[in-house]
C-alpha cells in the first residue's frame, strides 16, 4: 500500500500521524470535561473568537498565535464569568462573542494585504504540514494538561458534577471553572494551528461523547476518548491519502460516523435484552 | 444544658427586588430533628441555602454553634434536591460519596486512605455498599437518594440539611429512609425540608412552617388556622384517628 510505504519513508506523513495522536490526547483530556459539562457551544464560541485575535495581530504585524491565545483566553474568561454570575445570559453571550469575534477577524484581515491565504490555512489547519516544532508544542500542551488534570482531578470533577455542593465544601468553584475554560481555550488555540478549527471542535466533542456511552468515570472517559481520537485521526489519514481527499475533513467524517453508529447501538441495546 | 446548633436572627432576603424571606428568627438545638414545611415558593430551599452560605442575606445573622456561619460551613452536611441532579454523569457511587471528603485534608491529588475508609463506613450505614462500583446512571430514585445522604455523611458533619429527600421515591422506600434519618439523628442535628407535613410529624421533634415568614413553630399547635395561613386556605383538614 502506498500509504504505508510513504509513512515509512516520508517525514510529513509521520508528523501528520504523530500530530493526530498528540492532538487526540489533548482533546481526550479536555474534551471529556466539555462533554460532561455540556459546554460544546461554549467551546465553539471560544474557538471562533480566535479569528478576531488573529486578525488584529496580523493587522498590527504581530505573531498571530499570540493574538489567537489572547482572544481565546479573553473569550473564555468573559463567557465563564457571565455563566457564573448571570446564568440565563450565557447563551446569548456565547452567540455574541462567536459572531463578533469572527466579524472583527474578517474586517482586520480585509485590511491587511497578502495575508489572506496564510490566515485561512492557519484557521483551517493542515495536518499534512505539521512541523517538528509544532509537534513539540503539542507534546508540551499534553503534558501540562495531564499534570493539571491529575493534580486537581477531584476538584474538577466536583465542580463539573455538582457545583453547589463543591461550594459548600469550600472549593474555589469559580477559579476552577475558569481554569477549566482557559485550559479549553489553550487547547483550542494550539490545535487550531495544526488541525484547524473544525477538526478541533470535532476531536474535542465526538471521541469523548462516544466514550461516555461506555464507561462510568471521567478518568476512563479521558483514556477511551484519547484512544478513539487516535483511531479516528489515523483511519482518516489512511482513507484520505490515496484518493487525495482533504485529511481534516475525512477525519471528521470518520469520527462523526463512529458517533452516529455508537449512539444507534447504545440506544438499541435495551430492546435486545 | 443543650447547645444551640443553628441560631437565626431577624433574617431578610430578597432576590431581584422580590422579597423572599422576611423576619426569620429561629433556634435549633443540638440533637433536634426539625421539619421545615410550607408551600412551594414559600422560601424553604432559599432558607436552607442561606444556612449553607450559598446565598447572602440582606440583613440578619446566622450563627452555627455560636459562631458566625463563615467559620462553621464545614460542620454542615448537605443533601440537595434529587430532581436537580445530573444523573447522566459518568461517576461511580463510591466516587460520588467521596466528594463529601472534599475540603478536608490534602488539596492536591486523589483521596486519602482515611477518606476511602470513611466513605466505606457511610456506604455501609446507608446500605449502598453493594452498589459502590455501580454507575449512578443505573440507580433508582431511592438508591440515588441514599448516595446523596452518604455523600453528606462522609463530611462527618454536626448538622445535616436535607432538601425534600423523599420527593421522588415511593412510600415504602420513604419510610425506610426516614428510619435511617432517625438513627443518624442520634449523633447529629437534622433539618429537613418537606411538603408532606403529615409524614414527617412521626419523626421530627420540632416543626417550622414557612411561607415567606415563619407562620408557626413547635410551640404553637398546628391548627386549621395556621394551615390556612400557610397554604392559603385551599387545604382540607383531615383528622387522623390512631
Image (tube, helix red, strand yellow):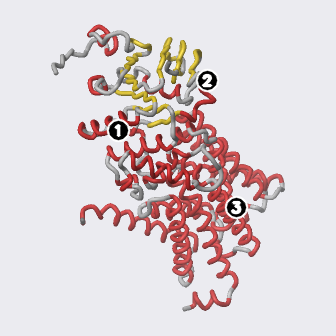
Question: For the residues marked 2 and 3, what is the alpha-carbon distance in whole angstroms?
Answer: 42 Å
Q: Is residue A120 visible?
A: no
User: Dot 1, how many residues are within 10 Å of its Cα: few (below 14), some (14-19), or many (20+)?
Assistant: some
Give how far across and how far down residue B8 sits, in percent.
53, 17
Residue A206 rendering spot, x and y as whole percentages: 49, 62
Depth check, front residue: A125 or B183 = B183
Read off the residue under disc 2: B67
Name the residue: 46% across, 44% down: B151
List the residue tagged with mark 3: A144
Looking at the image, which residue sits at the far top? B225
Task: Name the residue nearer the viewer: A247 or B224.
Answer: B224
Residue at 23% x, 39% y is: B172
| Callouts 2 and 3 on one subunit | no
**Quadrant (top left, top right, bottom left, bottom right) of the N terminus of chain A:** bottom right
Mark 2 or 3, which is nearer the eye? 2
In this view, the residue in front, A191 or B210, is B210
Q: Which residue is mark 1?
A: B180
Q: Chain of mark 3?
A: A
Instruction: Give residue B191's position: percent from left, percent from top.
Output: 43, 27
- The answer to whether residue A203 of the structure is visible from this angle is yes
Q: Check the image and name the residue furthest to the right.
A: A61
Give the CA separation, mark 1 to mark 2.
29 Å
Chain letter, disc 2 residue: B
Amino acid at each position: 500500500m502506498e500509504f504505508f510505504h510513504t509513512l515509512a519513508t516520508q517525514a510529513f506523513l509521520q508528523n501528520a500521524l504523530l500530530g493526530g495522536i498528540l492532538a487526540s490526547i489533548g482533546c481526550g483530556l479536555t474534551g471529556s470535561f466539555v462533554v460532561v459539562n455540556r459546554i460544546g457551544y461554549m467551546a465553539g464560541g471560544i474557538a471562533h473568537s480566535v479569528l478576531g485575535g488573529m486578525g488584529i495581530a496580523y493587522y498590527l504585524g504581530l505573531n498571530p498565535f499570540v493574538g489567537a491565545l489572547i482572544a481565546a483566553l479573553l473569550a473564555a474568561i468573559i463567557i465563564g464569568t457571565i455563566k457564573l454570575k448571570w446564568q440565563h445570559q450565557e447563551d446569548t453571550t456565547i452567540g455574541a462573542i462567536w459572531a463578533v469575534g469572527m466579524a472583527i477577524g474578517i474586517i482586520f484581515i480585509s485590511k491587511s494585504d497578502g495575508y489572506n491565504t496564510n490566515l485561512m490555512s492557519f484557521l483551517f489547519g493542515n495536518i499534512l504540514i505539521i512541523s517538528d516544532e509544532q509537534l513539540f508544542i503539542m507534546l508540551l500542551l499534553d503534558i501540562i494538561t495531564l499534570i493539571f488534570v491529575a493534580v486537581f482531578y477531584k476538584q474538577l470533577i466536583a465542580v463539573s458534577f455538582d457545583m453547589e455542593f463543591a461550594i459548600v465544601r469550600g472549593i474555589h468553584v469559580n477559579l476552577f471553572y475558569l481554569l477549566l475554560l482557559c485550559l479549553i481555550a489553550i487547547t483550542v488555540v494550539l490545535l487550531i494551528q495544526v488541525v484547524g478549527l473544525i477538526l478541533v471542535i470535532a476531536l474535542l466533542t465526538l471521541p469523548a461523547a462516544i466514550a461516555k456511552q461506555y464507561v462510568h468515570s471521567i478518568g476512563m472517559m479521558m483514556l477511551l476518548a484519547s484512544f478513539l481520537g487516535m483511531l479516528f485521526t489515523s483511519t482518516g489519514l489512511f482513507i484520505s491519502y490515496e484518493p487525495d481527499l482533504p485529511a481534516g475533513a475525512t477525519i471528521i467524517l470518520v469520527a462523526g460516523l463512529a458517533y452516529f453508529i455508537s449512539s444507534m447501538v447504545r440506544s438499541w441495546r435495551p430492546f435486545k435484552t | 444544658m443543650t447547645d444551640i446548633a443553628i441560631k437565626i436572627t431577624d433574617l431578610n432576603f430578597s432576590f431581584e427586588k422580590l422579597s423572599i424571606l422576611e423576619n426569620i428568627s429561629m433556634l435549633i438545638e443540638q440533637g433536634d430533628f426539625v421539619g421545615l414545611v410550607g408551600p412551594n415558593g414559600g422560601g424553604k430551599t432559599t432558607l436552607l441555602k442561606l444556612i449553607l452560605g450559598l446565598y447572602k442575606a440582606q440583613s440578619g445573622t446566622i450563627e452555627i454553634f455560636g459562631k458566625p456561619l463563615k467559620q462553621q460551613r464545614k460542620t454542615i452536611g448537605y443533601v440537595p434536591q434529587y430532581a436537580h441532579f445530573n444523573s447522566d454523569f459518568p461517576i461511580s457511587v463510591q466516587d460520588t460519596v467521596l466528594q463529601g471528603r472534599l475540603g478536608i485534608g490534602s488539596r492536591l491529588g486523589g483521596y486519602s486512605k482515611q477518606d476511602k475508609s470513611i466513605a466505606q463506613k457511610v456506604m455501609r450505614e446507608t446500605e449502598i455498599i453493594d452498589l459502590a462500583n455501580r454507575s449512578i446512571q443505573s440507580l433508582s430514585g431511592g438508591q440515588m437518594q441514599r448516595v446523596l445522604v452518604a455523600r453528606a455523611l462522609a463530611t462527618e458533619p454536626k448538622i445535616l440539611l436535607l432538601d425534600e429527600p423523599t420527593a421522588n421515591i415511593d412510600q415504602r422506600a420513604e419510610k425506610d429512609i426516614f428510619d435511617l434519618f432517625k438513627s443518624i439523628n442520634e449523633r447529629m442535628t437534622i433539618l429537613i425540608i418537606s411538603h408532606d407535613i403529615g409524614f414527617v410529624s412521626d419523626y421530627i421533634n420540632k416543626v417550622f412552617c414557612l411561607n415567606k415568614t415563619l407562620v408557626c413553630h413547635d410551640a404553637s399547635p398546628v391548627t386549621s388556622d395556621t394551615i390556612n395561613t400557610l397554604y392559603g386556605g385551599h387545604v382540607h383538614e383531615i383528622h387522623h384517628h390512631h
